[in-house]
Amino acid sequence: MTTETFEFQVEARQLLQLMIHSVYSNKDVFLRELVSNASDALDKLRLAALRDDAPDADVSDLHIELEVDKDARTLTVRDNGIGMSYDEVTQLIGTIANSGTAKFLQELREAKDAAGADGLIGQFGVGFYSGFMVADEVTLVTRHAGETEGTRWTSRGEGTYTLERLDEAPQGTAVTLHLKPADSENQLHDYTSAWKIKEIVKRYSDFITWPVRLLPEPGDDDGDGAEAREAETLNSMKALWARPRDEVSDDEYHELYKHIAHDWRDPLETIRLQAEGTFEYQALLFVPSHAPHDLFTQGYQRGVQLYVKRVFIMDDCEELLPSYLRFVKGVVDAQDLSLNVSREILQQDRHIRMIQRRLTKKVLSTVKDLRTSEPDRYATFWREFGAVLKEGLVTDSENRDAILAACAFPTTHDADEPTSLKDYVERMKDGQDDIYYMTGESRQAIENSPHMEAFRAKGVEVLLLTDAVDEVWVDAVGEYEGKTLRSVAKGEIDLSGTEEDKSDAEKEKQGEEYAGLLGWMTEHLGEDVKEVRLSSRLTVSPACVVSDAGELTPALENMYRAMGQ
Ligand code: ADP
Ligand code: MG
């Protein structure tokens, strides 16, 4: 059949150039990416078979195979999983359809060091292309399980790739890397060496639940003249979540995280949970160290992986964690669910709800503990995920206190260290009844606001809230330990309890004195204001605009307006 040549999209070409010429600190990870893809493909096929979606597929010996040809300098990673149709190859491999790619490229250029660049690659799902770090040509032959026709894709990673339809091909996918000329200076990069391959698989892919086999080389018969030796299985295939804590190293957990999350960076925190008894399950959860770029978009795939009795059932099981913990990655392995469990069943299942409740509490308490035990790591957590977590203050009233305990709010008390509400309340002045906050676009904008003057003058602490969600949760939460959350920009503010203030008689006299002016201003500002009144909230500025206590603040008005409401 004919071979057609296509051009890479501009973005894909740029990405490949970066991949080929870059200075990645660790090229070994290309193999992890290819094995990870193969493992995903096997998971998908087994699942399809369980659901009777792949009647013609062969699922008798699902595995991953590595084959080296020293003379041709090739390394092949082969799986007999779900495979790809011709169209899928075009969509998944030929282009970078991902809308985040442009942003990715920009971040990649800005990344100061190789480690930073490493981290970005996996996050944007360009794992397959990493083959070009070590190969000057990559060939992929694939057949979707159950289909008859196969596809061959080839590229040298330059401007173009070719596609060809094949009458026949083995089920699954084989990726062959034509390795770059041997680097005689650096034995460490000899990917035709069995020793090297074993080391990489052991280090990065040991937990993969499918056998990763290394085929013996032709002629490599131990000198006893026997037929080719058996393929050797390189990984232990042990599910990390089922092994005792003290038998598993942090590195092993981190590699599992990278496989699951398609991230190249270590997670910030690992959380283990085992439930025994009537409903048994194990959970291994990870808090990433960076928020994904699409965390706030609609298409964001949230949720953790669901396994049933060690069998992968689905990615992104949304029912296992609430939306405000959508950044958490990991695995839940339940013993008593049916392998046939569907999304519809999951939504109704009371065991799943039980698991969700337990995982939620565990994640929240972990974050709370992090805050006291490791302030630096907590600061990273808060920077990356604080805005998402706060959504829970609005949507999850059951866990409100636990969420508040895991939150940190910027405050006038200390420019560098955000505070908990608990600490705020402890610092409250005698006679102060409310917790004061102000919302705005930035810390600086808030601090420059005339609303802050009286608070600064009297030394009353104010929380400085700058996320869009802040407008909403303060209303939803309303109070903390009996203290009302009060905006300094709304309604009448009474700070009189915190300091000696003008007597009522004085105020009345002032009122009479200015009545004429206030009346004149109210009239002239017309429709734009409801009322002009004297205020004790200002010390320097002559006037400021205030909303009524029940009204939307300007920022929230803007937010709703932007949403078209
Ligand atoms: P990611 O794994 O993060 O999605 P990759 O660049 O590694 O990104 O792979 C892109 C896509 O190509 C995968 O999501 C998958 O759909 C497809 N793919 C890659 N390798 C295989 C394979 N061995 N079998 C089937 N599909 C594959
Ligand atoms: Mg991948």
Image: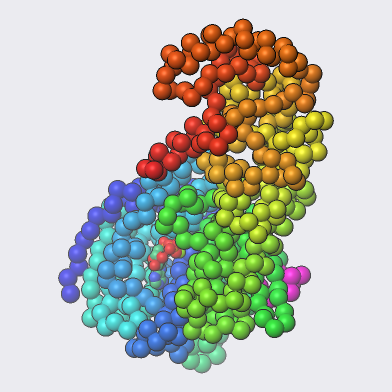
Q: Position of residue 32 (x, y in %)?
A: 52, 65
For residue 23, above or below residue 40: above
Q: Is residue 55 left or right of residue 271?
A: left
Q: Quadrant of ligand 1?
A: bottom left
> Residue visible at 53% across and 9% down?
517
Which is more toward the observer, 527 or 166? 527
Residue sitting at the far left = 2
> How was this image coloured?
rainbow
Q: Quadrant of residue 201?
A: bottom right
Q: Is residue 90 left or right of residue 270?
A: left
Q: Position of residue 493 (x, y in %)?
A: 66, 27
Q: Position of residue 50 (x, y in %)?
A: 45, 85
Q: Main secondary structure of the magenta part?
A: helix
The boundaries of the magenta stretch are 240-248
> Residue visible at 51% across and 91% down?
225
Which is more toward the observer, 47 or 42? 47
> Residue visible at 73% across and 41% down?
483
Camera sees residue 82 = yes
